[in-house]
Image (cartoon, rainbow, N blue to C red):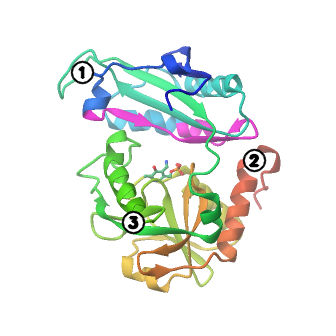
Amino acid sequence: FDQLDGFIWMNGEFLPWQDAKVHVLTHGLHYASSVFEGERAYGGEIFKLTEHTERLHASAKILGFTIPYSVEEIDEACRTLLRKQGFSDAYVRPVAWRGSEQMGVSAQNNRINLAIAIWQWPSYFDPAQKLKGIRLDIADYRRPDPKTAPSKSKAAGLYMICTISKHAAEAKGYADALMLDWKGDVAEATGANIFFVKDGKLHTPDATNFLDGITRRTVIDLAKRRGIDVIERAIKPEEMEGFEQCFLTGTAAEVTPVAEIGPYRFTVGEITKTLMDDYTAEVHPAHAIAAE
Ligand code: PMP
């Protein structure tokens, strides 16, 4: 990834892609003092850009630092970089981290850095698998109690157990892993939220212990516009036996049907297909469906 062409916006400058580097003594690398965002551009416009940038600011605040660029400045940098990269559909990755001025757990005076990279990432899961519904393992690691980790921050450190869990699932031939929360209830996949369908209604874990995804909220809104009830509640893993459909939501994953989670099986049904189509329509600026 460090060998691509184009530009990366870093601390106010557009650098040639291969020159956007950090020192090995970067605090963010040693102590995970780093937060990031994942956004998608469709038809030349970044979907819910300001909401993402506000979440980036909020994530940094939770980790105790302030990004030295305003939401407006970051939005503008993202838009300009998208045009400079020349993509109309692309993935946008802002990342903020504590620099290398001081070493040790404490890094009160380290510079806060911000970079933005944009590349083409058409599909998070294998497109053929996605249509049939992907297969998920159940992860050994659990999403931490909000008193154990800053669960509401999109913090790099929270992804350590996600990468371990996703690698373990992939080694067994699965596309991803479902993670439970610290109480043993269903939480989310390693980089996406989860929904189930039963008797025409959507059931999704309430987002108390993990990231309340922007896609999750968009899909809840789309479902409500269709008159589909959405129930946000604690979901026990055994309840998956009685669910008919399942799908993941996330900026990268968009709406991805799930066919299998451990011993449980689901079909790619009408509600899933409708919400996949509604999401596609919603994110494309020219075709956004009007609220009813
Ligand atoms: N949970 C995790 C752990 C994620 O990494 C993501 C992707 N950012 C999501 C949920 C979904 O969030 P969003 O819809 O805002 O992309």
Residue corresponding to mark 1: 108
Q: Residues within 10 Å of mark 3 (few under 14, many from 20)?
A: few
Position in image of residue 2 (x %, y %): 49, 27
Q: Amino acid at mark 1?
A: Gln
Alpha carbon separation for disc pair 1 and 3: 43 Å
Q: CA distance from mark 2 to mark 3?
A: 36 Å
- Residue that carries the numbered disc 3 in the rendered image: 172
Which segment is the magenta one?
A: 31-52
Assign the C terminus to one quadrant of the image. Answer: bottom right
Q: Looking at the image, tell me whether mark 1 or mark 3 is earlier in sequence order.
A: 1
Give the SS element for disc 2.
loop
Q: Residue 77, relative to residue 236: is it above or below?
A: above
Q: Magenta stretch containing residue 47, yes or no?
A: yes
Image vertical order of residue 278 relative to residue 123, above or below: below
Residue 257: where, in percent of width, then height?
A: 59, 67
The quadrant where residue 249 appears: bottom right
Q: Position of residue 263 (x, y in %)?
A: 42, 81
Q: Is mark 2 within 8 Å of ligand 1?
A: no
Gap between marks 2 and 1 measured at Cα = 42 Å
Does residue 51 appear left or right of residue 111 in this picture?
Answer: right
Name which residue type carries label 3. Lys
Q: Which of pointers 1 and 3 indicates the residue nearer the eye? A: 3
